[in-house]
Image (spheres, grey):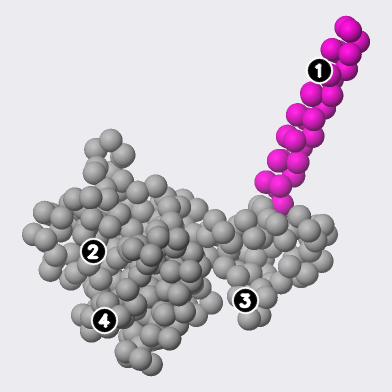
Amino acid sequence: MVNQSGKAEKDSESASLKTERDTVKSAKRVLQILEFFAHNRRSASVGEIVGELDFPQSSTSVLLKSLTKLGYLDYDRQRHVYLPTMRVAFLGEWIHDQLFSDNSLSRITEQLHEKTGATVLIGMQNDIYVHYIHLIQEPQPTVPLYIKPGSLRPLHKAALGKVLLSQKTDVDALAIVRRINGEEPDPDQRVNTTALLAELDQIRRQGYAYTESTVRAGNGVVAMELPTPSSQPPMAIGLGASIEVLKANKNEFIDLLDETVRPFRARLSWKGPPKRGA
C-alpha cells in the first residue's frame, strides 16, 4: 500500500514537471515566433515559420491560431499568411517612448487622456468583434467605465465597432451582420439590418459614431476611424465617459479625436469611408 502511494505521488510529480516544461516550451516558442516576424518584417505562412524555426507543424498551427484569437496576429484568409498586429507593437512601445519618442500613438493617447480625463480606447477588428487592444484609463475602483484590456465587443454594438463597420461597403457589412445574426439564438437580439445600414451611412457622413449605455449603463463612447496600413486590421479610436460628461463635451471630444487621427490620415493618404452601397 505504501509503495502504491509512493508511486502515485511520483507519477503526479512527473506529470506536473512535464506540464511545466510544456508551458515553458510554449512560452519560448511564442517569443521566437514574434522574433521571427521582427527579423523578417513581413507576413509568413505556417510552413515558412515551421521551416525556419524547426517547430512541429501541429503545435505551431495551434500557437498561431491562439495568437490570432488573442489579437496579436492577423490571418489573411486569401493568402494564408500571418502578420503581427498593432497589439504587439503596444506591448513595448511605452519603453521606447520613455527613451526616444514624443510622437508615438501610445504617447498621443496619453496626452488625449490628460486633456479630456476620459477613457481612451483603441480597438481593431477581430472577426465579428472589436478587440480593445490599448486603453488609457484610471484605476478600476475610481472610474465607472473601466474596460479590461483585451476585451471583445460585438462590432454592431460598440461605437468603435460601428466605426469599423462603416468603413466597409454595405455588402461586406451585411455579410458580417448575417454571421452575427446566425450565431444569435434569440430572435429579439438579432440585428435589424435596415436600421444598422442607415446608422452606418450616418457615421460615414458625420465622420464619427456615438453610443450610449452599450458597454456599460450610464456611460457612452464617441469614436472615429484610426487609419492603418492595408497590411493591418482596421482600427478605431474613441473617448469614453459618463453620458453626462460626454454630452457636455461631445463637440470638443470630436475635435480632439479628429486632431489626433489627422496625422495618420495624411501619412496614409486616407480617402475616407466608402459611399453607401459601394
Whichever of labels 1 and 4 marks the residue nearer the N terminus, that label is 1
Between residues 275 and 191, which one lies in front from this camera angle?
Answer: 191
- According to the image, label 1 marks what residue? 9
Please tell me the numbered disc located at residue 211.
2
Q: Is residue 253 left or right of residue 88?
A: left
Q: Amino acid at mark 4?
A: Ala
- According to the image, label 3 marks what residue? 77
How much space separates mark 2 and mark 3, taking CA atoms? 31 Å
Residue at (34, 84) in percent of width and height: 273
Q: Which residues are magenta?
A: 1-29
How much space separates mark 4 and mark 3, taking CA atoms? 29 Å
How much space separates mark 1 and mark 3, taking CA atoms? 47 Å
Q: Residue furthest left?
A: 248
Whether residue 128 is visible here, answered yes or no, is: no
Residue at (43, 56) in percent of width and height: 152
Up-down relation of residue 142 to residue 8 (above or below): below
Q: Residue furthest right?
A: 3
Asked which secondary structure carries label 4, the reply is: helix
- According to the image, label 4 marks what residue? 198
Q: Are marks 1 and 3 in contact (CB under 8 Å)?
A: no
Which of the two marks, 1 or 4, is nearer to us in this view? 4
Residue at (39, 47) in percent of width and height: 148
The picture places residue 67, in percent across and down from the top left corner, at 60, 57
How much space separates mark 1 and mark 4, taking CA atoms? 65 Å
Residue 38 among magenta residues: no
